[in-house]
Image (tube, rainbow, N blue to C red):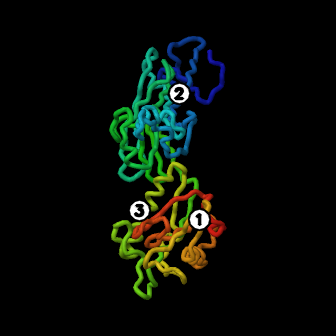
């Protein structure tokens, strides 16, 4: 006899219809002096999206493919993808379903199939195979899964399964705040990859000469024929979108201050007709040129905020390290190289 008082229990008894002479009188089947009532636990169905620790999760992170590659033997730099890299990735996730009704055979480990779909444009629903955690457990789990922000990474065939096919283990999440929903019967679970930090970009496109003199932001960008502000807006939009894919695994999204590019005349002391005279390095420190100081020191081109990034687009950077006639379009340096004049 079950003596526990549980909210999930129901009482089930069979009754004979009441006689016409007494429509309120029901009789238990079989008729006994002391009817025995059997209590049966009500089995709830649960669908969960889980994190790498196996805990139910409402938020996830885009995978970084951490430790996904290994170098091949030899003198070259050839690498290959580690076969079980998703199982080791710290940002992996999974699906867990608890459903006693799906445990149809108490003597074998069974499988069930659920549906999973991203909310991103063009995403297709796919089937995922879940395997029972043991004999007669009624708990089913998926293989480790991973979100990725680049289509090329999503296209990589883990376990030789093509993109969006049954049990494909990677999901394309090109931009943050997207979500994945898993469906089992009428029950669903949803988890989101949220934006954890917004970084503001204050973008200045410096014209080759003053606008009053017919100045344009650029005559050419790496051969892309950017000749109008509209062209440049689209070019910057593509650049920011690409950057957001790169930083999605860190939960970071970049946004333009004011949602636009600022087109500005070159300040006094800046002549971009032959590119911006770029810095040199002395004793592992950047030494700014007079032209750079004039550009970066112009207060009208800077925001008051101290938590955004100031971006300056110029036609080219002419540095002392360039070969004659060559120009630099961009360069990354260690923070230790940055002069104090660039810090706030």
Residue 291 in picture, x, y percent from top left: 54, 77
- Does 226 sit left or right of 141 as displayed? left
Residue 143 in picture, x, y percent from top left: 45, 31
The residue pinned by badge 3 equals 238
The residue pinned by badge 1 equals 286
Mark 3–mark 1 CB contact (< 8 Å): no
State the residue in front, 172 or 106.
172
What's the residue at 51%, 80% (across, down)?
Answer: 270
Task: Check the image and report above or below for 240 versus 184.
Answer: below
Q: Quadrant of the N terminus?
A: top right
Figure quadrant of residue 156: top left
What's the residue at 37%, 32% (across, down)?
Answer: 159
The residue pinned by badge 2 equals 43
State the residue in front, 19 or 267.
267
Mark 2–mark 3 CB contact (< 8 Å): no
Figure quadrant of residue 274: bottom left
Q: Secondary structure at mark 1?
A: strand
């Amino acid at each position: 006899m079950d003596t526990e008082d549980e909210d999930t229990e129901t009482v089930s008894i069979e009754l004979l219809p009441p006689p016409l002479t007494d429509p309120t009188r029901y009789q238990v089947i079989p008729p006994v002096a002391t009817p025995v009532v059997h209590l049966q636990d009500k089995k709830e169905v649960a669908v969960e999206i889980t994190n790498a620790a196996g805990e139910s999760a409402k938020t996830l992170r885009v995978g970084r493919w951490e430790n996904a590659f290994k170098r091949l033997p030899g003198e070259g730099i050839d690498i290959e993808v580690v076969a079980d890299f998703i199982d080791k990735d710290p940002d992996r996730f999974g699906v867990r379903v608890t459903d006693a009704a799906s445990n149809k055979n108490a003597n074998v480990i069974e499988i069930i199939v659920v549906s999973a779909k991203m909310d991103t444009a063009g995403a297709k629903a796919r089937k995922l195979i879940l395997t029972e955690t043991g004999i007669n457990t009624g708990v089913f789990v998926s293989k480790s899964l991973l979100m990725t922000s680049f289509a090329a990474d999503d296209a990589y065939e883990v376990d030789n399964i093509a993109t969006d096919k049954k049990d494909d283990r990677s999901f394309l999440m090109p931009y943050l705040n997207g979500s994945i929903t898993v469906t089992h019967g009428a029950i669903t679970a949803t988890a989101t990859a949220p934006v954890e930090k917004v970084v503001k970009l204050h973008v200045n496109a410096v014209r080759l000469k003053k606008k009053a003199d017919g100045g344009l932001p650029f005559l050419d960008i790496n051969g892309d024929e950017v000749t109008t502000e509209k062209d440049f807006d689209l070019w910057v939009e593509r650049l920011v979108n690409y950057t957001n894919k790169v930083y999605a695994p860190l939960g970071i999204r970049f946004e333009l201050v004011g949602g636009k590019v600022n087109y500005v005349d070159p300040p006094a002391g800046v002549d971009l007709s032959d590119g911006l005279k770029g810095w040199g390095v002395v004793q592992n420190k950047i030494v700014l040129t007079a032209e750079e100081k004039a550009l970066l020191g112009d207060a009208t081109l800077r925001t008051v905020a101290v938590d955004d990034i100031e971006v300056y687009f110029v036609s080219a950077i002419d540095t002392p390290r360039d070969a004659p006639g060559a120009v630099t379009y961009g360069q990354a340096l260690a923070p230790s190289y940055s002069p104090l004049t660039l810090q706030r």
